[in-house]
Image (cartoon, rainbow, N blue to C red):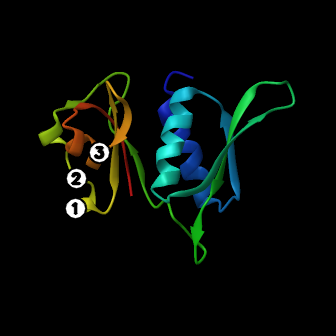
Amino acid sequence: MNDPIADLLTRLRNASRAKLDECVMPHSKLKASLAGILKTEGYIKDVADGADDRGHKTLVIAMKYVGGTPALTGLKRVSTPGRRLYFKCDEIPRVLNGLGISILSTSQGLMKDQDCRRNKAGGELLCNIW
């Protein structure tokens, strides 16, 4: 797996379209941090650590649905391993005029776009979520 963020986004997109209750994937600190942001923003119900039958750590994400429709309607990977995109704090683009969020990797860790503007921190734009 060359791009763990794209893997996370694809698994979440597939789980929400298939209306699955939970999504299981290999664990990493980056994925756990990104899932934590999604939980605080209300896009997913819960994030938990688990283990598969071989003892490898997994990340178990409980999907959230509102009236039968997924809370996650769109996920887009912006900065890829072949094309990194960096933005200053005042240049971060808005997602759907503020209805969605952007997640950036900064020197202070992963942050959503509003926190980056508030803390005047720029960084690599990982993905857009709406």
Marks 1 and 2, how far apart at CA: 6 Å
Q: Which residue is mark 2?
A: 94
Q: Earlier in the sequence, mark 2 or mark 3?
A: 2
In the drawing, what numbered circle is on residue 97?
Answer: 1
Does the image show residue 89? yes
Which residue occupies the foreground of this view, 93 or 15? Answer: 93
Say whether disc 3 or disc 1 marks the residue closer to the N-terminus: 1
User: Does 12 sit above or below residue 32?
Assistant: below
Which residue ends up furthest to the right in the rendered image?
53
Alpha carbon distance from label 2 to label 3: 13 Å
Q: Residues within 10 Å of mark 3 (few under 14, many from 20)?
A: some
Secondary structure state at the residue bearing disc 1: helix
Q: The C terminus lies in which quarter of the figure?
A: bottom left
Residue 9 shows in this picture: no
97 and 7: which is toward the camera: 97
Q: Residue at x 33, y 38 (%)?
A: 78
Q: Disc 3 residue type? A: Asp
